[in-house]
Amino acid sequence: MADNIIIRVQSPDGMKKIISTKRETAAAFLKKVAKEFGFNSNGFSIYLNRNKTGEILSQNKTLSLLKIKHGDMLFLFPSASSSSSSGEVMDTIQEDEIDQYLAKQDGKIYRNKDAQLCRHGALGKCVHCVPLEPFDEDYLNHLDPPVKHMSFHAYLRKLTGGADKGKFAALENISCKIKSGCEGHPPWPEGICTKCQPSAITLNRQKYRHVDNIMFENHTIADRFLDFWRKTGSQRMGYLYGRYTEHKDIPLGIRAEVAAIYEPPQSATQNSLELLEDPKAAAVDEIAAKLGLCKVGWIFTDLLSEDTRIGTVRFSRNKDSFYLSAEECITAGYFQNQHSNPCRLSRDGFFGSKFVTVVATGGPDNQVHFEGYQVSNQCMALVRDECLLPCKDAPELGYAKESSPEQYVPDVFFKDKDKFGNDVTFLARPLPVEYLIIDITTTFPKDPQYTFTSTQRFPIENRDILGETQDFHSLATYLSQCSSTSFLDIVSDFHLLLFLVTNEVMPLRDSIGLLLDAVKTSNEDLAQTWKKSEQWATIEQLCSTVGGQPSSSLGYGAMGGPSVPASSSAMWSCVHCTFMNQPGTEHCEICSLPRS
């Protein structure tokens, strides 16, 4: 022990002390340094002097022969390849197109000359008319309506602004797990130290949001999704497919535009919803990508009829109850972790998520409203590391898990005011989920937009319980109703394209690329070229074989439109309360009124 010496090694990241001995070789000492600083053996050089003279090479000479004594300071310089490795990794990250576009924009808020306050010429600028930064909180608070959260790219401008131009800006993902590789003590639960212990989390309102607006291209998308609830009374869930575009109402804002809703297999009742395994998930994502779309979020209903005679729904989600339940926040966090946001300023290559949550629920006017949300990055971390649980009897409360021999959970705190108005810190057991939620405005455009231009309705997938099936009989019926329109308009239906690719009789997954390009670019000539292919001729032959008689899949009587009489072997919708009744019954189970 008397031979032990401490050598100080200074690097661009700071100084560390290395314990060694006088008889230790330079090669062994360099291995210790590499392990301590996280370099490979060739990723750095060590010198006796700051001016890079007296390099210590990997050799068998002892430290005493190299005249290195107790308390000496050595200087570590990363090699060129090592020092640029992290930067190269960050530069090779492929960000989303909208992020690349906004990164190149000026983003400043330009103001006109004030007639009363400005006292300068036309070319001059003063404090009353100089352009504002996109993260100016006073400007955002005075918008109509006020904006509580700046856009994510405005937040990045705030980080990378100033004299250093963001030289030291880095976005760190929160981790609730014990850091691995700590050898100074036994592993948890036998030991833990300040080096490997994750920091406690104090929940704060997130100042930015990754998506600033959600817009459905037209009302038809939402109406067809709501049809399931109107006909059955059961809740429904779907994935939103669309694209990210610039939201010009907020500086450097991002909008999620929804072009279609895919409904995966699920089991639902009036009060519950359970997702089932989806064997077609990969094919759906592949088709959407070829159409220039991606999965931008998920939507679910929470609707309960108030008065069936006038079509009102109950206003259940409000400030006195909750906006999102803890279980829904956890589900949203799970989806956001699955669809992380690529980011060059993060060492992990990703930060946050653009994946949104939309709830179809009753509004203050007892009509169906669409409310958009995301959960904060803190919630994503708690969900990813399995630290957050829902409360059974209080949907508005979550619960931070307690540490166990199997898992260490850091303390989670939140701040609130006591009865005297003082700020008090509470342990998040339980936790109001309002601290985890970010609200997003959800809108419909004045002038409807249509990525898919078909005017007819091909049955939506996974609605067999309604008697709406995707098969060649329903395809024949669909084609017979579209005989007078152009072929591009006929096939420009998201659910039809999914059926053509995923049907079990004749899947067209490998031969539908040209048709998807035609729909994506609205090119009628490409569509006509694909129509002449052998695959479409086979599809037409199959349709002619099964015939094109109208099927129950086209009925939508609960919406007030034409309804096809159901057979005695199919479920039927009550014309009075829209409840879906079992086949063979002549009176509604809910309102007891006759079927006719």
Image (cartoon, helix red, strand yellow):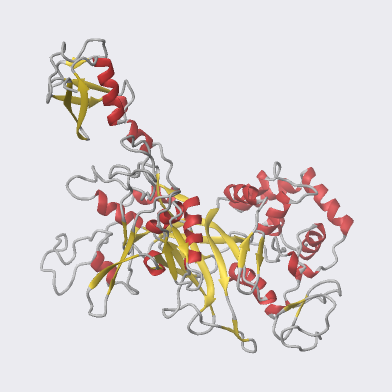
Residue situated in front as seen by the camera: 328 or 575: 328
Between 504 and 291, the one nearer to me in the picture: 504
**At 47% across and 66% down in the image, what residue appears?**
326
Q: Is residue 79 visible?
A: no
Q: Can the viewer see residue 541 in this picture? A: yes
Task: Please state the horizontal and vertical placement of residue 471, each as a whole percent of the image.
Answer: 79, 58
Q: Quadrant of the N terminus?
A: top left
**Image height of 466 relative to 9, above or below:** below
Instruction: Tell me where residue 543 appears, x and y as whole percent.
Output: 84, 56
Q: Position of residue 65 (x, y in %)?
A: 16, 10
Q: Is residue 401 left or right of residue 456?
A: left
- Residue at point 27%, 76% (across, down): 418
* Residue 218, position as x, y percentages in the image: 56, 68
Q: Is residue 252 left or right of residue 594?
A: left
Residue 436 found in image quarter: bottom left
Q: Is residue 491 above or below residue 286?
A: below
Q: Residue furthest left?
A: 119
Question: Is the C terminus in the top left, top right, bottom left or bottom right quadrant?
Answer: bottom right
Q: Residue at x 72, y 50 (%)?
A: 502
Q: Nearer the viewer, residue 566 or 5?
A: 5
Q: Quadrant of residue 565?
A: bottom right
Q: Is residue 374 left or right of residue 511?
A: left
